[in-house]
């Protein structure tokens, strides 16, 4: 029997090499591309379940795990996470609509969002959530009116901005004074007063979210201490409070360094929460789906220019925006390993007319030929979900693998779909 080896750079054992060929669970990746075309997103159900379980084991049975839908909103992924015992973290009426279409319950869902519209607030209240994360004072009268119309006070958590450094990319840091999110702690007293004074609002918790791709426990503890100090400033700030929503942001490794030690975050926070009788709520997105996905792309050709060697592939920044937007580095590996092939350093670039359109720069890869397949790893989070039609490109298909089964969970976009909104 051919040997099974870990796929270098992958954070998931469900992507591995067997006979030199990349597999997702029991299925050879090459077969999936033959069936569904390229570029192609491939997700492992086993990895998604394992990650949800890891968070559950760390935070315990009473914790509410609200998967951040924005990371990967595919309906089949949402259903899988519901089956794994997760609720959802929503940030738009569109995400709420996804739960409705997938017939998923909303009673374990929370709704954040820095600029909610009236219709979104009304739809969320009508759906009935675990609680609503308030980020701005303007939401309060809209929420109270929706509560009054429904004849039931709305459960709200106040999202505080604790001004904590998350040590992450500037574009995905959210818990600093200069970021638009949450209510600054020094302005929060008046907001709590307003919530408490309104019979149609009921303060049930506090929420923070410091940013994404955090790798250290410290910021989570610091944020909690700041929230706790605020709450202790006045008895009415803790009256009726049952939940502490510590947000998401659990980092993964992207082939370098360690992922966030989620168990250590839980170990640091749970005793502090227990002391107050507060139930933990977590909103992981990337940690659950990031390592569970790859983007497979096919080599178009090679080109030498100045000192650079470009490897042209059929996936581009419209399919995976993270390298262009955040200078993110995703490991890239060949789907078929060829140990004897000459290694070279190349920039892996797509067909989009932008100099910033790269999937990876200065990567050491075996010499490739037209048609060879490459896998861009750890793209299950914020990959397909951020894909666009730039350059009038159709978005890729998505496949979910579960054991030896592979199921198309999102069709490749067609030109008809690309044009259907235009008049
Ligand atoms: N909760 C809230 C309120 C959030 O805003 C986010 C992400 C999460 C939870 C989930 O964060 P996660 O656990 O996935 O880090 N597009 C960027 C990430 C943006 C994250 C936005 N908010 C990227 O590709 O890195």
Image (cartoon, grey):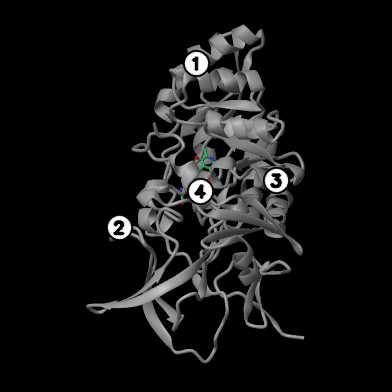
Residue at 74% x, 51% y: name it.
57
Q: Alpha-carbon distance for marks 4 and 2?
A: 21 Å
Label 1 packing within 10 angstroms: few (<14), some (14-19), many (20+): many
Q: Quadrant of residue 342?
A: bottom left
Residue 367 versus residue 29 in the image, above or below: below
- What residue is pinned by disc 4? 414
Q: Quadrant of residue 175?
A: top left
* Ligand 1 neighbours mark 4 (CB distance < 8 Å): no
Dot 2 or dot 3: first in sequence order is 3
Label 4 packing within 10 angstroms: few (<14), some (14-19), many (20+): few
Residue at 51% x, 57% y: name it.
215
- What residue is pinned by disc 1? 140
Marks 1 and 3 in Cβ contact (< 8 Å): no
Residue at 65% x, 42% y: name it.
75
Residue 312 versus residue 3 in the image, above or below: above
- What residue is pinned by disc 3? 81
- What residue is pinned by disc 2? 353
Helix, strand or loop under label 3: helix
The mark lying in front, picked from 2 and 3, is 2
The mark lying in front, picked from 4 and 2, is 4
> Seen in the image, is 307 located left or right of residue 242?
left
Dot 4 or dot 1: first in sequence order is 1
Label 2 packing within 10 angstroms: few (<14), some (14-19), many (20+): few
Dot 1 or dot 3: first in sequence order is 3
Marks 4 and 3 in Cβ contact (< 8 Å): no
Near-viewer residue (293 or 42): 42
Dot 4 or dot 2: first in sequence order is 2
Residue 348 versus residue 202 in the image, above or below: below
> Seen in the image, is 169 located left or right of residue 6?
left
Q: Position of residue 403 (x, y in %)?
A: 76, 63
Near-viewer residue (67 or 340): 340
């Amino acid at each position: 029997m051919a040997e099974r080896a870990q796929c270098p750079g992958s954070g998931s054992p469900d992507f591995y090499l067997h006979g030199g060929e990349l597999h997702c669970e029991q299925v050879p990746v090459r077969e999936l591309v033959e069936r569904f075309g390229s570029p192609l997103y491939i997700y492992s159900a086993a990895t998604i379940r394992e990650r949800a379980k890891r968070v559950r084991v760390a935070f315990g049975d009473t914790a509410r795990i609200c998967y951040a839908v924005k990371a990967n909103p595919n309906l089949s992924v949402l259903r899988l996470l519901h089956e794994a015992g997760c609720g959802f973290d929503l940030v738009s009426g569109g995400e709420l609509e996804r739960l409705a279409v997938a017939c998923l319950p909303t009673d374990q869902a929370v709704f954040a969002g820095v600029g909610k519209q009236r219709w979104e607030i009304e739809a969320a209240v009508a759906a009935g959530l675990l609680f609503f994360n308030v980020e701005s004072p303007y939401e309060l009268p809209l929420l109270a009116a929706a509560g009054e119309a429904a004849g039931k006070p709305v459960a709200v958590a106040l999202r505080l901005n604790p001004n904590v450094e998350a040590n992450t990319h500037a574009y995905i840091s959210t818990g600093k004074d200069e970021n638009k999110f949450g209510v600054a702690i020094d302005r929060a007293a008046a907001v709590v007063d307003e919530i408490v004074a309104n019979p149609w609002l009921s303060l049930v918790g506090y929420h923070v979210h410091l940013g994404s791709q955090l790798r250290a426990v410290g910021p989570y503890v610091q944020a909690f201490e700041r929230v706790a100090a605020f709450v202790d400033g006045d008895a009415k700030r803790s009256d009726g409070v049952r939940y502490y929503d510590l947000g998401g942001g659990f980092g993964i490794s992207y082939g370098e360094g360690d992922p966030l030690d989620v168990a250590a975050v839980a170990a640091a926070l749970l005793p502090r929460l227990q002391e107050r009788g507060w139930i933990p709520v977590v909103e992981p997105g990337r940690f659950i789906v990031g390592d569970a996905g790859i983007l497979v792309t096919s080599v178009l050709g090679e080109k030498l220019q100045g000192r650079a060697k470009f490897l042209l592939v059929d996936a581009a920044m419209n399919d995976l925006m993270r390298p262009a937007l955040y200078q993110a580095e995703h490991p890239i590996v060949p789907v078929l390993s060829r140990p004897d092939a000459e290694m070279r350093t190349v920039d892996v670039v797509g067909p989009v007319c932008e100099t910033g359109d790269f999937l990876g720069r200065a990567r050491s890869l075996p010499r490739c030929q037209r048609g060879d397949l490459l896998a861009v790893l750890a793209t299950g989070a914020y990959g397909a979900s951020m894909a666009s039609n730039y350059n009038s490109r159709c978005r890729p298909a998505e496949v979910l693998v579960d054991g030896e089964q592979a199921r198309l969970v999102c069709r490749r976009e067609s030109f008809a779909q690309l044009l259907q909104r235009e008049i």
